[in-house]
Image (cartoon, rainbow, N blue to C red):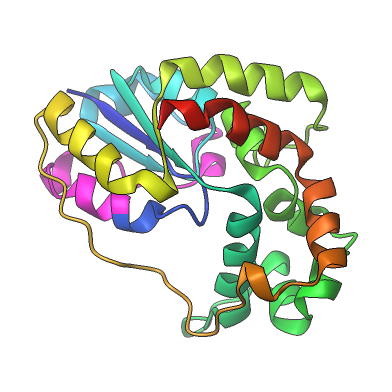
Amino acid sequence: MKIGFLHIPKAAGMSFHDALAANFPQSEICPLRHDGQYKDADFSALSSKYNFFSGHINFDTFQKLEVEKLISIVRDPIDRIVSVYNYHHNYEPRDGETLMPNVLSAKNNSFSDWIRTDSKAVMQDLSNGMVRQLSSIYCRNSDLTRSNLDIALKNIEQIDLFGFSSIESGIARIEQSYNLSIKMRVLNTSTYTKRTEDISDQDLAYVRSLNELDIELFNSVKSRF
């Protein structure tokens, strides 16, 4: 079975990727983990060679790869944004690595200043990231409109979707449906942790205003998990 995992950032994705990948030999796992890496890809060749595709990849890329089953995890949008900030704020570069602008912004700013950035790179993480990825405009030079929410809601009908808060029941269903063994390990956590409950009401309101589409999407699909 050819399986895809649409990894939405900071929604237990690294842990779930690791657990899913353990069901495939290394030779069947596609090494491309970001949508930009597929820009000039030979989709037919990749689909013939690999049986597991995973990463920060747009919905339409998985369609081109002709995966048989597509899985994703969604998370409360406000909690996800706080987790993005924590992860980038704590990120330590590897030797010789140049930090991306979105990481630098979180490292160099308080949460309150970070959410008020005018950086387009940061806004990809900060504003309606789930709708962006599920409507196939994540990290692409496309404007986000309300029509993207409609596209995302239509696309999730083709995804085996479950929520971050109900991950155990979601895993049990995936194991049973796909005959897989999924043993989760906690990965990619942050040492410095800013909690949602510690954020000021003013900042929370601002984050909600930036994520109105994600909040609407999340509320629309909660009944599924």
Q: How many numbered discs, if any? A: 0
Kindly indicate the quadrant of the structure image that contains residue 49. top left
Quadrant of the frame with the C terminus? top left
Q: Residue at x 59, y 35 (%)?
A: 218
Quadrant of the frame with the N terminus? top left
Residue 23's place in the image compared with 18, above or below, is above
Location of residue 122 in the rendering, given as x and y in whole percent from the top left corner = 75, 59
Q: Nearer the viewer, residue 172 or 72?
A: 172
Location of residue 62 in the rendering, given as x and y in whole percent from the top left corner = 43, 25
Q: Residue at x 43, y 48 (%)?
A: 164
Any part of residue 211 in sight? yes
| 163 within the magenta span | no
Kindly indicate the quadrant of the structure image that contains residue 176. top left
Side (left or right) of 218 relative to 49: right
Q: Nearer the viewer, residue 79 or 45?
A: 79
Q: Nearer the viewer, residue 200 or 177?
A: 200
The magenta span reads 16-40
Residue 47's place in the image compared with 205, above or below, is above
| 20 within the magenta span | yes
Q: Residue at x 42, y 72 (%)?
A: 189
Q: Residue at x 82, y 27 (%)?
A: 145
Side (left or right) of 156 relative to 71: right
Location of residue 182 in the rendering, given as x and y in whole percent from the top left corner = 16, 47
Q: Nearer the viewer, residue 4 or 37?
A: 4
Location of residue 211 in the rendering, given as x and y in whole percent from the top left corner = 75, 44
Any part of residue 29 in sight? no
